[in-house]
Image (cartoon, rainbow, N blue to C red):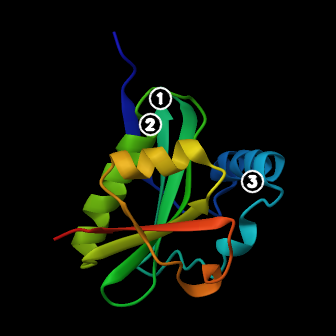
């Protein structure tokens, strides 16, 4: 019997959600020397163009992910994390984020990960994301690789 993954939209500032965000940040810091927190600023919980979700199995929070607006048609995937490998948590989170992005009206999603994060690179490619030129603050940063996907 497999565990049921429940995806819930939440406010990332909620005290109960902070533990998974801090776990992600610690994981990134350990692996890549940066916690990624400075890439997740300006969150507006009352803005419907922002989405933050958590994944739960039973009562345990096991993952998270977010979308923030880049422009009217483009959302950026941020803070994707699954604490349990090979349980389809990341796939489930990303599928829900893509559906929510379509409801918002985004026609494209973009994201950045580290070149060294081979697992993430393969994950996004398997989910139909294609490498795109680095955008925004990632332009000229050799450690960054960016991906995009059309939702139409």
Q: Residue at x 59, y 77 (%)?
A: 43
Residue 92 against residue 9 in the figure, above or below = above
- Which secondary structure, mark 3? helix
Kindly indicate whether the residue at mark 1 contacts the one at mark 2 (C-beta within 8 angstroms).
Answer: yes
- Nearest the eye: 105 or 115: 115
Could you tell me which quadrant the C terminus lies in? Answer: bottom left
Label 2 – label 1 distance at C-alpha: 9 Å
Q: Which of marks 1 and 3 is nearer the N terminus?
A: 3
Earlier residue among tags 3 and 2: 3
Determine whether the residue tagged by mark 1 lies in a helix, strand or loop: strand
**Residue beneath disc 2:** 89
Q: In this view, does 66 lie to the left or right of 88?
A: right
| Residue 107 point in image, percent of width and height | 24, 77
Residue occupied by mark 1: 57
Q: How far apart are marks 3 and 2 (CA)?
A: 18 Å
Residue on which the image places disc 3: 25
């Amino acid at each position: 019997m497999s565990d049921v993954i429940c995806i819930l939209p939440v406010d990332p500032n909620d005290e109960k959600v902070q533990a998974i965000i801090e776990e992600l940040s610690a994981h990134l810091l350990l692996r890549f020397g940066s916690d990624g927190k400075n890439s997740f600023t300006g969150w507006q919980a009352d803005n419907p163009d922002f989405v933050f979700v958590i994944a739960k199995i039973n009562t345990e929070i096991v993952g998270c992910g977010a979308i923030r607006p880049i422009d009217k048609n483009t959302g950026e995937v941020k803070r994707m994390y699954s604490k349990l490998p090979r349980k389809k948590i990341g796939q489930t989170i990303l599928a829900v984020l893509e559906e929510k992005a379509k409801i918002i009206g985004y026609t494209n999603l973009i994201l950045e990960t580290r070149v060294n994060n081979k697992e993430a690179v393969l994950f996004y490619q398997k989910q139909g994301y294609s490498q795109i030129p680095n955008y925004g603050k990632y332009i000229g940063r050799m450690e960054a690789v960016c991906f995009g996907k059309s939702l139409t």
